[in-house]
Image: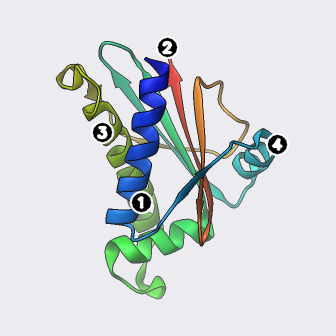
Amino acid sequence: MKTNLMTAMKTSISEVMESMFYLPVEISHADTMAIGELISSRDVAGGRLEFTGPCSGSFSLFVPRDLLTVMTENFMGEPRKTLSVEHFEGVLKECLNMIAGNTLRSMADASSYDLHVPDMVEPGTLPATNALVQVETMDGTMVVTIELD
């Protein structure tokens, strides 16, 4: 199941980032030290989305604020000067929701999963995780994790 979940998550990340945020991505080999530095940076926004179903757990997304600004501009179709903190947080939560929903939808028993409401999380240490993906864009690197209960 973990292998299927990872494959589905990588596909979902590519689809969501390219179609909704107009950002081509490359999934790279996870560099744990670089990811730890990214996630602990104060210049990173983070979100978490829990899910329940045949397996339960959570997805987390950590995005540097500069990359989140580009994502928000692209998603909202608005210039940077008109964007607020609520826009940035809303886009991060929506991105997380789309990645998680698209990932779980591709599983055989997709209708059995329930997504909870995404929350913002403080930057900190790397969560204990079963799966971690480092996502490279031309505008920066973000990290997506899955924790299974």
Outermost residue toward the right?
33
Residue 68 in the image, given as x and y percentages of width and height: 53, 66
> Looking at the rendering, which quadrant does residue 144 occupy?
top right
Q: Amino acid at mark 2?
A: Asp
Q: Please tell me in which quadrant of the rendered image residue 5 appears.
A: top left
Marker disc for residue 101: 3
Mark 1 highlights which residue?
A: 17
Which labelled disc corresponds to residue 33?
Answer: 4
- Distance from label 3 to label 1 (Cα)? 14 Å
Q: Are marks 3 and 1 in contact (CB under 8 Å)?
A: no
Label 2–label 1 contact, CB within 8 A: no
Q: CA distance from mark 3 to mark 2?
A: 18 Å
Amino acid type at mark 4: Met
What residue is rendered at 46% in x and 43% in y? 10
x and y percentages locating residue 142 in the rendered image? 60, 54
Residue contact between numbered discs 1 and 4, judged by CB atoms under 8 Å: no
Tag shown at residue 149: 2
Type of the residue with mark 3: Gly
Element type at marker 2? loop
Res. 126 image quadrant = top right
